[in-house]
Amino acid sequence: MKHYILTVDDEEDVLGTLKRALQRDDYEVGQARSAQEALQKIAERRPDALILDINMPPGMDGLELCKRLRTDPRYTDLPILFLTAHAQTEEIVAGLDAGGDDYVTKPFVLTELSARVRALLRRLQPISQEKSILQLGKVCLDSSTYRVRIDQNEVQLTATEHRLLRYLMEHPNQTHSAQHLLEAVWDYPANTGDPDLVRAHIRNLRLKLGDKADTDRFIRTIHGIGYMVSPIY
């Protein structure tokens, strides 16, 4: 079956460009011109991925829509790709902090857009049942539900947060640069991508895990090099 991608933007030209590009890649494409319309369409049919403009008409912008979706257990793992104005760093960081998985800037290059969508959808591929549970010290990650448990406390992760944490837990006590993680987790080609993607998701993981995981010792920043996960007991 074709993947269903919902595109959300208040500009008709952008929606038209997205539709043509995604249909060429053999996706089924839905369209919404406001966050409210997007919520209605998502409730009617869950998309496989959401392409969401940050700047929307008054009432609810893309950031607020993303936050609402992330607080709903049905959509915590929904892949969300933000569209943002070129070089608006604060906007990009806000989108990632709201729960976005990745972003592309306007005006976007169609080949880059296609690559980002393919990468988002690859992250949804299920992990075999035999390998779905990963234990590292007192931290247990369940890849069938995207939940992480520390002692008796459970936290829900997004698809990208899960993929990032799983990769780090599969390689404990090893330091990974932001560039390496962009390639291993986000599927970016070598020497491309934005290190802010990694920083934002590491920050969000630490916030979600909180004191329960003693995050200063669990997800460690190795200054000048990258990030490392070490078991805690």
Image (spheres, helix red, strand yellow):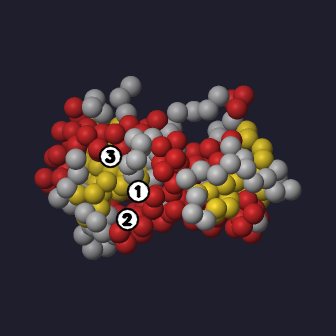
Question: In the rendered image, which quarter contains the N terminus?
Answer: top left
Q: Earlier in the sequence, mark 2 or mark 1?
A: 2
Q: Nearer the viewer, mark 2 or mark 1?
A: 1
> Could you give the CA–CA distance between mark 2 and mark 1, rounded to whole angstroms?
10 Å
Residue 228 picture quarter: bottom right
Amino acid on which disc 1 is placed:
Asp
Residue at the limit of the structure toward the right, as seen here: 233
> Residue under circle 1?
194
Q: Earlier in the sequence, mark 1 or mark 3?
A: 3
Left or right side of 114 for 151: right
Q: Is residue 85 at all visible to an observer of this figure?
A: yes
Left or right side of 133 for 63: left
| Number of other residues with Cα within 10 Å of mark 2, as a class: few under 14, some 14 to 19, many 20 or more | many
SS at badge 2: helix
- Residue at 68% over, 59% down: 219
Q: Residue 149 location, x and y as percent?
A: 75, 53
Residues 69 and 226: in front is 226
Q: Earlier in the sequence, mark 3 or mark 2?
A: 3
> Residue under circle 2?
92
Residue 194 picture quarter: bottom left
> Residue under circle 3?
6
Q: Nearer the viewer, mark 3 or mark 2?
A: 2
Q: Residue 88 location, x and y as percent?
A: 30, 69
